[in-house]
Image (tube, rainbow, N blue to C red):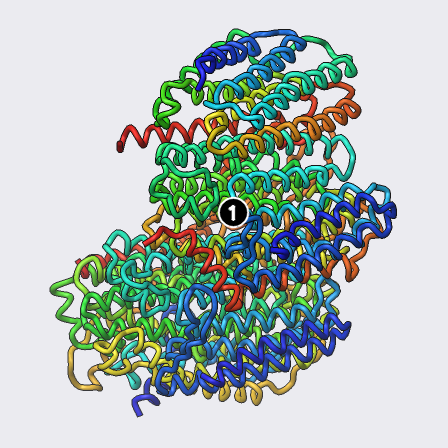
């Protein structure tokens, strides 16, 4: 009981402290502090089986544990990166950034634990709102525009998700069920839910939360927001926030699955997944801004996630594993891209080259991250993508698998041309060094993440595997 | 198997140690550690490989793996051992050579990291060969691509190198995607499935003919890319030219062959019908001819060698195609001959091309250029390297008494057997295959005489070439060992053929292999010895006959008093007659002629030729360009207009609701 | 014993063929001509002379004549002359062709070793034309192999061939024509090349050996003669098949046939002009096509 | 369910059309306010028995949607000194036509959704969907940030109407939705509009198109 609430409230308290603390210098250290505290609590919580609060409205199940683990590892590692980064950006006020990041951390635990559909919606909402000001960190017209788009499109998604939640609730009302909106109750009584309302509900929920995941064609805010936000924020948005929305989709999918009405949902998820991958590939082909490139990569991987869920079977496990892999790899990419951005003071591919020379470790990390995210072994994404692909083939989705492979190839081509241009060759003469150098605090965090990605590619610890299997099992149809 | 595991472990551990030492700013120690590890590992790995070829029972090993894709199965059978032998032998030599070659590299990359990457490449290639499951195979396959890519772009400050690396990466990625699809297609759809080769074999039996053809096509593309089968070869010359020479040697000698290994494994899985033999044969003939025709036009020393690899892969494919065809048509002897010849050629080519790339590396290292037109007279300046290069050139022209002849001899025999016994068009086709092979042989002689003659004979064409000296001992020793292999392989080809027979027998199956190894190579070894003896005898005779020879006289040159090196026949003019008279325009290098006389006074003008691969020029480049153009048309979606973005969301909702209604209407 | 006879024939009788050719050409020109044994005299003279080696050259330069002669001599052991060849095995025809290739390889390398523009030019042409002649040689031999169902020269050119003239005469005519073109091209005779002028105008073989002198040149000449002899033996056996019988009769027949070939070469050299260089490939391609046609004829 | 519900819904639908058709910013804002008041009234009309709880939410809704937000928008309009025209991307007549088609489609689609006995015959679902659609139309076809905010508010209103179906069974959900929407509208959009105003000295969002793929 206390733990469940503490997971949420401790970071929120630290967020309040961040807003109150006057020192620009010391405030960033609240981030690693909060990250470490939350990571410790999460590790305890993951090992327990009965973390819950508010009479079941909050409960940490296997799905939530997976998300929470990912979030906290990502947050902790990028929080270690934050102080060094913010010292470089001393001209910018970091109060909002630190406070909002910590607030996001708190609300994300709420997402992971929410088992009441209303609470879930509120929690996702709050996490989106908490993250919005961080996009505006740079305080210029471009970041303002990005924030405005992020917020407006996000709000439309929010509204649709709420509409979907209403539809779902009404399907319970129509089925003559009580007023409970707890996931457990709905799953238990799922066969009595009204199918027509359920389907319509899923459409609104999927589009709504899909907007926040950044699935095509609702992804339009993503390149703007990721492109203008600091790399640190990009990491948490791409790895963490998208995971929160994905979890929300999964919760509703779970109910549909229990009701035996998941067919439409699966078809839509496969379609949206493939569309996202192909669209992302198309945008990468001649992308000139490498942070936007990463945003499209995020769109692609959100597509892989929902495609995996849509395919089902072994792909469910693959999708959850891919959630971890993608999040961690995105961390490597955004943090190293942030370093490169600092070292060249440009995020246009045309102006940046020879990163392996100027910032060797960051350059190498960016390159390794590229290989990892495009599914090259021995990194984790290869295993999860192969699992999904295999399940697709075995499930009789041969054409889906073919589309998947084609999309991966297009993405590889688009991304590779940019990444290689950035890391290889000599720095351009008209891009003098900015004085940024690789230091332990700026390359250590992405290095740790890369190590984790590598580990997931070679060795899946048994507890983690069991956790993923349990989470995937919850999403399978009842036999 | 334990020794093989030790080999893998040693490679990975020494790579890790080297990286650690490199991070600790001890690059020399790192290089030495990596090299020592590679040599020890290769020695350890050669033992089980040799034992397996000597008839030891196949071994296997299953390692538990926590990933959801089953355990990792490794195994050693004669086919694996057959590819392990050149891999480990050439690997050790390349590692030793590479240390000296890169010791003073001034490029952007760290030699220590390259040494570690080389060990990683060796480890992944070993794993490719011993993997007995699709997952382990794919992981090793991709790791092989990545490590070799890192080595190819060692000099990535050069634009050409970057482009070559990118082309390589694209090709490898497309190939890997096909392989992924291939293996997943074969997984049995019934039961628990499984991606081990045994299960895939069962799965392949359950496939219908269309699916089987699709699977074969995927395997053909996937492995064909790596093997450099025309028209998928386009990455090969670029990457080989760009890579450091010991890496080129390893790639040409082994990595490319692993594509053939994949084809052979796929053949074991799919049990190809005889008709596919025609396709392989045709691909082989096209590859051999196109490869050599392009090789003889190149100015870049290493591109010549690389295109020759395309040619030789074509020759091996001719053998494989013939074997496939002959097996299905009751010609067991021809099948056995063709396969043995093809496999023998794989070994021989590994030694020959390995040697040639190492020699080329010596030249590049000492003369600082890959341009044939800037070389010349190197034999006098680097006698050991030059002599070995000439030896390699002769071997690559498939001339006795060297090893290159033996494999082609068996291939000719196999083709000839079919040509003289098979009725009708098949016989004629085989005969034309013989003709094509003969033409290829003649053109190979032209190519390598051009290479050896222009680079090593005559007078130096540049100051750098004139200053070149013999490279370090650590570079010449590996070459000498390979040169020794060329000679021994030429004089005792039967030994090599017997050694690889278990692998051939495994591929042929018991019905054909039961009849025993086809005879035929014995006289070749004897002839080789006779050639050495005759040449030696006449050489001594000439020594005796030449009594007095004045020193320090120039070349007569038809009486021209002051011949200069610039008057020598150039590499371009050497092949000019053939290229400009006999080749169709699309096979020729594209030339950019200066336009003269357009203005009143002549302006500075440049004449240049560009030997971009014709297949790239005609097919892949336009294809990729149009593809990128088409694909990026989608960018109009993102115009920055927020209202439009909201329309997308609305459209998504409407489309989904529409689909829902449609579904309900269609399937109430 | 048989080997010694073959070697002796190739090395000691071959210059006679050169003498005959020269004599025939002289007669056509209305001159008496040099003595038939003149090539022998030349050889003796050369072997007794001193040598000059350019400072540009290396051991490769001396290797040219050596390997050229050695391979021609060894090739003679694979060709049937009066009877079966001393060495014959399945596939010896390949060894035969590639031995000649080896000789060519080093002759050409030796030419390039001088660093002379002329010799480089000759070298380039030599390899270009021989590459084009290669398929013609192989395809022609395959026709014979198909008749004898064997890939051994002794079997292919053995006694069975005579009967085939009755059944498959058309393809054998094609084969003889193709092989004769190969013979002319490989030995740099007119119409491919003019061997008599020791000038840069002689475009192929002779220009390659411009820098050789003394014993080395002697070896070159002897090697070239031996090559003409062994290739001539091929043509002789196809054109005038020998039945089984007495070895002595066989040798007499064989030497007669070789002389006839020498005369034929001489006649061709006398009545034809050297082709323009750019037309030489057409001739060789035509030979390839002839032999390919022959293959199709017999395989049909 | 009271008999006043359907007339109120008709009022809301008519307001939708009025919003699509009005050319003056002031009118748009006032229309939004009117719709907010109507929603408050609906909230009281829908439940079978009235509780203090519901009345409180209704009062809050009227205060926020009917008074506070329109007031803020009026102020923003005055401060920014912008032109008072709506400046549509799609003209008024086409907007109205689209709105009509949308309302028709919403009616059709709503018929496929089965209703619980107590709601049978109600216009709630179709009114909700049609209002959501109107919101979308306003969001996408109007150029100024202020009109986009009002469009978004209309969209929210549509969602809110849907929530009325649940007001008896799960009142919590409705409150939550209503209140948090307002949070979005007031705090975040208010702040952003302020910033946009400062940075671009105009509330024309057509200028916010620097971030794009060219």
Q: Mark 1 sits on what residue?
A: A115
Q: Is residue A110 above or below residue B116?
A: above
On the image, the x and y values in percent for residue A420 come to 64, 51
| A133 relative to A393 in the view: left or right | right
Closest to the observer, B55 or B307? B55
Query: B220 above or below C67?
Result: above
Classify residue D28 by image quadrant. Answer: top right
- Which quadrant holds the N terminus of chain A? bottom right
> How packed is label 1: few (under 14 Cα within 10 Å), some, or many (20 or more)?
many
Please state, as top left, top right, bottom left or bottom right, where the C terminus of chain A lies in the image: bottom left
> Could you tell me how many numbered marks the image carries?
1
The reply to whether residue C39 is visible in this rendering is no
Q: Nearer the viewer, residue B369 or D123?
A: D123
What residue is shown at x 12% (from left), y 64% (from top)? C167
Looking at the picture, does residue C59 appear above or below residue A471?
A: below
Q: What percent of the width, then of the height, locates residue B584?
A: 44, 46
Instruction: Please state the horizontal and vertical placement of residue A428, each as a whole percent of the image.
Output: 77, 47
Position of B174 relative to D214 (above/below): below
């Amino acid at each position: 009981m206390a733990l469940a609430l503490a997971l949420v409230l401790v970071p929120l308290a630290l967020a309040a402290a961040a807003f109150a603390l006057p020192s620009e210098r010391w405030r960033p250290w609240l981030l690693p502090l909060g990250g470490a505290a939350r990571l410790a609590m999460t590790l305890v919580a993951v090992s327990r089986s009965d973390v819950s609060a508010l009479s079941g409205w909050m409960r940490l199940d296997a799905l939530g544990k997976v998300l929470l683990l990912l979030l906290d590892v990502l947050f902790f590692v990028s929080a270690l990166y934050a102080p060094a980064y913010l010292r470089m950006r001393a001209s910018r006020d970091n109060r909002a950034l630190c406070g909002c990041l910590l607030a996001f951390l708190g609300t994300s635990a709420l997402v992971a634990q929410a088992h009441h559909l209303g609470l879930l919606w509120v929690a996702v909402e709050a996490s989106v709102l908490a993250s919005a000001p961080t996009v505006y960190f740079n305080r210029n017209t471009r970041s303002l525009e990005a924030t405005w788009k992020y917020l407006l499109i996000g709000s439309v998604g929010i509204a649709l998700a709420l509409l979907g939640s209403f539809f779902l609730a009404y399907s319970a009302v129509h089925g003559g069920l009580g007023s409970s909106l707890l996931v457990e109750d709905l799953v238990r009584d799922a066969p009595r839910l009204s199918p027509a309302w359920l389907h319509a509900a899923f459409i609104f929920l999927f589009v709504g939360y899909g907007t926040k995941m950044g699935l095509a064609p609702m992804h339009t805010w993503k390149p703007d927001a990721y492109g203008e936000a600091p790399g640190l924020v990009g990491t948490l948005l791409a790895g963490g926030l998208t995971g929160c929305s994905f979890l929300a989709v999964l919760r509703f999918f779970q109910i549909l699955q229990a009701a035996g009405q998941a067919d439409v949902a699966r078809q839509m998820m496969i379609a949206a997944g493939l569309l996202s991958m192909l669209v992302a590939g198309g945008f990468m082909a001649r992308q000139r801004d490498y942070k936007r490139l990463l945003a499209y990569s995020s769109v692609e991987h959100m597509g892989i996630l929902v495609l995996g869920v849509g395919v089902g079977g072994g792909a469910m496990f693959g999708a959850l594993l891919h959630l971890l892999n993608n999040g961690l790899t995105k961390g490597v990419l955004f943090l190293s891209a942030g370093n490169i951005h600092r070292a060249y003071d440009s995020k246009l591919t045309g102006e940046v080259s020879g990163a392996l020379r100027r910032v060797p470790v960051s350059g190498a990390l960016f390159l390794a991250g590229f290989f990892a995210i495009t599914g090259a072994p021995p990194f984790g994404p290869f295993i999860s993508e192969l699992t999904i692909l295999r399940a697709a083939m075995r499930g009789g989705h041969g054409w889906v698998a073919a589309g998947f492979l084609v999309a991966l190839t297009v993405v590889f081509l688009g991304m590779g041309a940019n990444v290689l241009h950035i890391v290889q060759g000599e720095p351009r003469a008209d891009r003098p060094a900015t004085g940024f150098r690789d230091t332990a605090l700026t390359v250590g965090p992405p290095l740790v993440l890369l190590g984790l990605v590598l580990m997931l590619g070679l060795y899946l610890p048994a507890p983690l595997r069991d956790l993923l299997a349990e989470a995937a099992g919850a999403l399978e149809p009842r036999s | 198997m334990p020794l093989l595991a030790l080999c893998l472990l040693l490679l990975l551990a020494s790579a890790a140690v080297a990286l650690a030492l490199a991070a600790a700013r001890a690059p020399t120690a790192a290089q030495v550690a990596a090299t020592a590890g590679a040599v020890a590992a290769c020695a350890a790995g050669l033992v089980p490989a040799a034992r397996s070829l000597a008839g030891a029972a196949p071994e296997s090993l299953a390692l538990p793996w926590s990933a959801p894709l089953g355990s990792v199965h490794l195994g050693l059978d004669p086919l694996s051992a057959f590819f392990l032998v050149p891999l480990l032998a050439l690997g050790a030599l390349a590692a030793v050579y590479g240390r000296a070659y890169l010791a003073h590299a001034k490029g952007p990359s760290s030699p220590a990291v390259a040494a570690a990457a080389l060990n990683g490449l060796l480890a992944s290639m070993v794993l490719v060969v011993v993997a007995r499951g699709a997952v382990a195979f794919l992981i090793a396959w991709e790791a092989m691509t990545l490590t070799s890519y890192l080595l190819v772009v060692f000099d990535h400050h050069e634009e050409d190198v970057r482009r070559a690396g990118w082309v390589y990466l694209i090709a490898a990625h497309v190939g890997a995607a096909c392989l992924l699809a291939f293996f997943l297609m074969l997984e049995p759809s019934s039961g628990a499935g499984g991606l081990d080769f045994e299960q895939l074999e069962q799965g392949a039996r359950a496939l219908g003919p269309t699916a089987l053809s699709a699977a074969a096509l995927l395997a053909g593309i996937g492995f064909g890319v790596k093997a450099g089968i025309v028209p998928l070869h386009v990455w090969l010359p670029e990457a080989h030219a760009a890579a450091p020479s010991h890496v080129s040697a390893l790639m040409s000698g082994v990595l490319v062959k692993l594509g053939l290994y994949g084809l052979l494994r796929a053949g074991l899985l799919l049990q190809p019908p005889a008709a596919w033999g025609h396709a392989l044969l045709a691909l082989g003939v096209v590859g051999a001819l196109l490869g050599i025709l392009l090789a003889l036009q190149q100015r870049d020393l290493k591109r010549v060698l690389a295109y020759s690899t395309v040619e030789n892969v074509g020759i091996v494919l001719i053998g494989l195609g013939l074997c496939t065809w002959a097996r299905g048509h009751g010609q067991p002897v021809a099948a056995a001959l063709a396969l043995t010849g093809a496999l023998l050629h794989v070994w021989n080519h590994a030694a020959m091309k390995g040697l040639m790339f190492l020699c080329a590396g010596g030249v590049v290292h000492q003369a600082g250029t890959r341009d044939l037109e800037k070389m010349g007279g190197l034999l006098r300046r680097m006698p050991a390297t030059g002599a070995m290069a000439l030896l390699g050139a002769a071997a690559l022209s498939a001339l006795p008494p060297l090893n290159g002849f033996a494999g082609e001899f068996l291939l000719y025999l196999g083709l000839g057997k079919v040509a003289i016994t098979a009725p009708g068009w098949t016989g004629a086709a085989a005969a034309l295959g013989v003709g094509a092979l003969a033409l290829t042989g003649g053109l190979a002689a032209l190519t390598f005489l051009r290479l050896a003659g222009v680079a090593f004979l005559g007078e130096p064409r540049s100051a750098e070439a004139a200053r070149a000296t013999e490279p370090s001992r650590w570079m010449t020793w590996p070459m000498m060992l390979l040169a020794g292999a060329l000679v021994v392989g030429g004089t005792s080809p039967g030994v090599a053929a017997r050694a690889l027979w278990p692998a051939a027998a495994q591929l042929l199956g018991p019905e054909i292999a039961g009849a025993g190894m086809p005879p035929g190579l014995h006289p070749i070894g004897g002839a080789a010895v006779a050639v050495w003896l005759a040449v030696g005898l006449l050489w001594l005779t000439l020594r005796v006959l030449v009594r007095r020879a004045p020193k320090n006289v120039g070349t007569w040159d038809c009486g021209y008093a002051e011949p200069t090196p610039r008057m020598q026949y150039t590499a371009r003019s050497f092949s000019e007659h053939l290229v400009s008279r006999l080749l169709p325009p699309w096979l020729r290098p594209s030339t950019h002629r200066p336009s003269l006389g357009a203005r009143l006074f002549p302006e500075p003008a440049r004449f240049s030729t560009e030997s971009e691969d014709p297949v790239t020029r005609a097919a892949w480049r336009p294809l990729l360009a149009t593809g990128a153009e088409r694909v990026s048309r989608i960018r109009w979606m993102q115009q920055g207009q927020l209202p439009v973005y909201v329309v997308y969301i609305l459209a998504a909702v409407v489309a989904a609701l529409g689909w829902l209604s449609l579904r309900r209407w269609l399937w109430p | 014993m048989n080997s010694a006879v073959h070697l002796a024939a190739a090395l000691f009788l071959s210059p006679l063929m050169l003498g005959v050719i020269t004599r025939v050409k002289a007669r056509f020109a209305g001159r008496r001509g040099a003595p038939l044994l003149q090539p022998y005299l030349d050889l003796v003279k050369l072997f007794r002379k001193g040598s000059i080696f350019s400072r540009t050259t290396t051991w490769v330069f001396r290797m040219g004549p050596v390997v050229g002669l050695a391979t021609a001599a060894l090739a003679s052991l694979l060709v049937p002359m009066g009877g079966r060849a001393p060495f014959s095995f399945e596939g010896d025809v390949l060894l035969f062709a590639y031995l000649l290739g080896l000789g060519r390889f080093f002759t050409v390398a030796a030419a390039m070793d001088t660093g002379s523009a002329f010799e480089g030019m000759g070298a380039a042409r030599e390899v270009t034309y021989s590459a084009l002649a290669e398929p013609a040689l192989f395809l022609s031999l395959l026709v014979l192999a198909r008749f004898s169902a064997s890939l051994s020269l002794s079997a292919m050119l053995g006694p069975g061939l005579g009967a085939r003239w009755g059944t498959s005469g058309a393809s054998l005519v094609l084969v003889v024509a193709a092989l004769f073109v190969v013979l002319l091209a490989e030995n740099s005779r007119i119409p491919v090349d003019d061997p008599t002028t020791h000038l840069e105008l002689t475009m192929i073989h002779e220009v390659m050996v411009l820098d050789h002198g003394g014993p080395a040149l002697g070896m070159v000449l002897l090697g070239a003669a031996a090559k003409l002899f062994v290739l001539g033996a091929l043509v002789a056996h196809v054109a005038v098949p020998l039945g089984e019988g007495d070895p002595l009769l066989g040798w007499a027949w064989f030497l007669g046939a070789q002389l006839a070939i020498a005369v034929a070469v001489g006649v061709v050299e006398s009545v034809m002009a050297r082709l323009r260089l750019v037309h030489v490939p057409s001739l060789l391609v035509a030979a390839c096509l002839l032999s390919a046609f022959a293959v199709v004829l017999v395989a049909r | 369910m009271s008999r006043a519900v359907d007339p109120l819904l008709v009022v809301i639908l008519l307001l939708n059309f009025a919003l699509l058709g009005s050319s003056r910013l002031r009118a748009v804002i006032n229309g939004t306010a009117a719709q907010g008041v109507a929603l408050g009234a609906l909230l009281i009309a829908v439940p079978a028995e009235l509780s203090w709880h519901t009345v409180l939410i209704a009062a809050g809704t009227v205060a926020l949607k009917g008074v506070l937000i329109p007031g803020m928008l009026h102020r923003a309009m005055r401060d920014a000194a912008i032109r008072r025209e709506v400046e549509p991307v799609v003209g008024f007549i086409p907007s109205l036509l689209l709105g009509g088609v949308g309302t028709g489609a919403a009616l059709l689609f709503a018929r496929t959704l089965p209703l619980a006995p107590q709601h049978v015959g109600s216009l709630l679902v179709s009114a909700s969907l049609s209002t959501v659609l109107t919101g979308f139309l306003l969001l996408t076809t109007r150029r100024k940030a202020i009109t986009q905010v009002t469009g978004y508010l209309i969209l929210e209103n549509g969602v809110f109407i849907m929530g009325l179906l649940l007001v008896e069974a799960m009142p919590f959900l409705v409150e939550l939705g209503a209140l948090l929407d307002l949070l979005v509208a007031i705090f975040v959009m208010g702040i952003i509009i302020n910033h946009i105003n400062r940075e671009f000295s105009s509330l024309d969002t057509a200028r916010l198109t620097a971030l794009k793929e060219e």
